[in-house]
Image: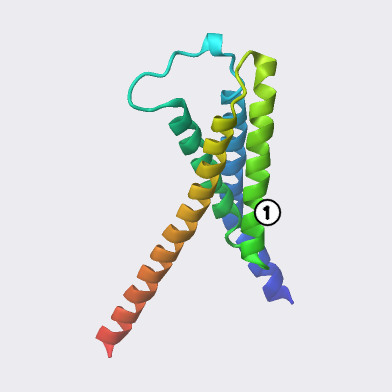
Amino acid sequence: MRGAFVNTLLLLSRSIPVVLLLVIYWVGLFIGTHIPTSQLNPIEGPLSDKTIHFYAYAGLGFLATWSIARMRGRRFLLFLFTMVVIIVFGALDELSQPLVNRSCSFYDWVADALGAIFGGIFYIVLSWLLHSSAKNTVKQKEASSE
């Protein structure tokens, strides 16, 4: 019983920095999307507004997936629930922007949703690749020591 408690504490101690980073990023994203356009510099260069939305929400999807990665249970359902929360947040984020003299755009929301899903899937693939690589390294070390 005590071992399970210690394992839970260790899991939480490893998750807290990721969750804290997620919260800071999420709050920063909300604040950034609610700065009135009169206070923003126009976007210059190759990045469009939709691209910025995509990458901003990809970061959010990546961090959110990372923060739930160690949770037990039905991980796929947890991932889907997390994506739904982010996509709903993106819709509410867009709908609230006219309150600060910004435009509400369906296509911005689509970029938000696609970015979140991409970020989440990117975390899953990256995690799998790193885990597979670590397993192969251990196997190679074991084989060379025999």
Say which quadrant the N terminus sits in. Answer: bottom right
Q: Residue furthest bottom?
A: 146
Q: Of residues 79 and 137, which is closer to you in this image?
A: 79
Q: Residue furthest front?
A: 106
Q: Position of residue 67 (x, y in %)?
A: 59, 53
At 53% across and 49% down in the image, what residue appears?
A: 117
At 61% across and 50% down in the image, what residue appears?
A: 16
At 29% across and 79% down in the image, what residue appears?
A: 140
Q: Where is residue 145 in the image (x, y as percent from the top left)?
A: 27, 86
Q: What number of labels is visible?
A: 1
62 vs 77, left or right, is left
Q: Quadrant of residue 20?
A: top right
* SS category of the residue bearing label 1: helix
Is 74 placed above or below 41 here?
A: below
46 vs 85, left or right, is left
Q: Of residues 131 and 36, which is closer to you in this image?
A: 36
Q: Where is residue 143 in the image (x, y as percent from the top left)?
A: 29, 86
Q: Position of residue 51 (x, y in %)?
A: 44, 33
Q: Which residue lies furthest to the right in this view?
A: 1
Is 95 placed above or below 69 here?
A: above
Q: Which residue lies furthest to the left in this view?
A: 144
Question: What crowding class fits label 1: few (fewer than 14 Cα within 10 Å), some (14-19), or many (20 or more)?
Answer: few
At 46% across and 37% down in the image, what residue appears?
A: 55
Amino acid carrying label 1: it is: Phe
The residue beneath circle 1 is 81
Q: Of residues 134 and 64, which is closer to you in this image?
A: 64
Q: Which colour scheme is used?
A: rainbow
Say which quadrant the C terminus sits in. Answer: bottom left
Q: Quadrant of residue 45?
A: top left
